[in-house]
Amino acid sequence: MQSIDAAVSIVLDKTPSSPNLKLKYAQELEIKKKQFEYLQDLSECKKECIHYFIDEYPIPYPDDRNFILEIAKNNPESIGKLPKVYLNNVEFVKFCLDNDCWDSWTSIPEECEEYIELVKKAVFKYANMYGSLSENVKSQIDPKEMIEHWMHLPDRRYFAIEMKSDFNWKEDEEAFDALLYSKNNLEIVGRKPAYYSVLQCAPQFFDDREFVMRIIDHDPSSYLKCSDRLKNDKEIVLKLLSKNGQLIGNIPQCLKDDRDIIKATLSSYSGYFNYLSETFKMDRELVLIALRAPKPFFGAQTVDKSFYNDPEIIDLIIRSGYIEKIDDFSDFTVDQIKDCVDSNTYTPELKNYFRNASFSDCLEVIKHNPSSWTYWDGCQDCPFIDELVLTYIQHLNPDWYCLPYSYQFKSIEQFKNIIRYDVNGEFLLCNAPKDALNDREIAMHYVKCRPKTVFPELSPEMQSDPIIRKEAIKNGLLNASFIPLK
């Protein structure tokens, strides 16, 4: 805020010597300074926290229209908290829509003049507002115009699907893409249950072999909605299981012992190996398919020990992450360990590897998969542990720091030197020295990152600090129930 203070003093120096006029200028500049500070606070708020911040720190000078427009333009999430006089004002709503700064979760008040025209304009820009409109208002909007507009915007296509039921799914490529987009984004949109399938949207094709073959590529669960005739079609079942072997329980019983069906299932779901008969489990070809499938750890658990003398199979077992039956780690290569932690990150047995490996080998594996050393018991005895931790923190993605559970920084100063790397505040605090949060610099950093969990742990003096409390509210302290002082 130095620039604002400097501006105040410069202007005051140039004002006439009249005390009244100088006082007036000083008051006006003080208002501008407070408005600037408030805008800066809002800009530092997480979007989902703006409502709570405004509740705690009400907007100053709400009668200043230009100030309110500036708030709305830069912080659309604040619109629901603005005085009603603005929300009911046609020009204000138009300003927000023209500047793409309307809050799509705030309804346009029906009392507003030109309500229907404003709603149409808003729905074109913010498709999710359509669902909250009354049937009377929806009837005044031309659905064809909306569909044509939304179908050309990938993130709006599911809204077009809800408005139109006569798409030619089979021949219209754009409509087919929209159908798939709707399916793939259902959990995000939250409009239909997760088990919803494409054939529920186009049931007229449940017995159309060509369409079902095509749709299973994108949505294997649609098999559950196809006709009994197609459910017994071996080619369709093979395609289904090569995409999602976990659906093996939904195919006809007469196909489950078919060797081709078993191979297709294992290629996408190694865990099915555990349910095979002993005869099939001793089939080397099937063992190899299971160990080369995604997430081979599950299939490796029941591979017969007689295969452990097979170099190709034991290599795949190591890479699968299932190493609890292996005692000797001395011959493991770095590449094997990398694949091992990729397949099964939380492998406690890896502590034996880290205990004896070199600095460069340890660092290479840790960089490859940061969670791989979390179970390294006795890491404090390692002569290069501090160097390894610092190198790891400096060179890895700050979204995924994960130190050994038994590691602890030796001093507050050592910890303060690394907190700037912990930009999300998610991982390093658990390894901090005792009473680290009594240090104001550390407390301020983590209150910004994790206010809900860190703020309650602060001392009463820290919690009472107005700057720390404001930073906590900006970053989500009040998104949950109010947390009283200790």
Image (cartoon, grey):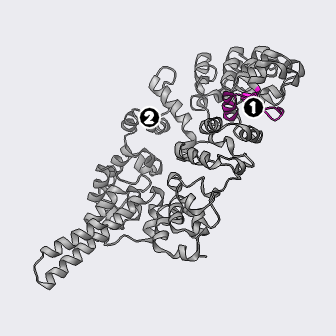
Residue 174 seen:
yes
User: Residue 297: which disc?
Assistant: 1
**Given the current orientation, which residue lies at the most extreme bottom position?**
19
Residue 341 percent across, percent down from the top left: 68, 35
The residue located at (52%, 21%) in the rendering is 170
Please identify the quarter of the rendering in which residue 55 is found. bottom left
Residue 121 percent across, percent down from the top left: 33, 47
Q: Residues within 10 Å of mark 2 (few under 14, many from 20)?
A: few
Residue 323 is a magenta residue: yes
Counting residues from the start of the chain, the first of labels 2 and 1 encountered is 2
- Amino acid carrying label 1: it is Phe
Q: Is residue 187 above or below residue 13?
A: above
**Quadrant assignment for the N terminus:** bottom left
Q: Which residue is mark 2?
A: 154
User: Residue 142: which disc?
Assistant: none
**Quadrant assignment for the C terminus:** bottom right
Q: Which residues are magenta?
A: 317-342
| Nearer to us: label 2 or label 1 | 1
Which of 395 and 168 lies nearest the eye of the viewer? 395
Question: Disc 2 to disc 1, how far (Cα)?
Answer: 37 Å
Please identify the quarter of the rendering in which residue 238 is found. top right
Viewed as shown, does residue 333 lie left or right of 152? right
The residue located at (22%, 72%) in the rendering is 8
Residue 480 seen:
no
The residue located at (16%, 80%) in the rendering is 22
The residue located at (53%, 63%) in the rendering is 442
Residue 165 percent across, percent down from the top left: 50, 32
Which of 443 and 59 lies nearest the eye of the viewer? 443
- Amino acid carrying label 2: it is Pro
Which of 51 and 209 lies nearest the eye of the viewer? 51
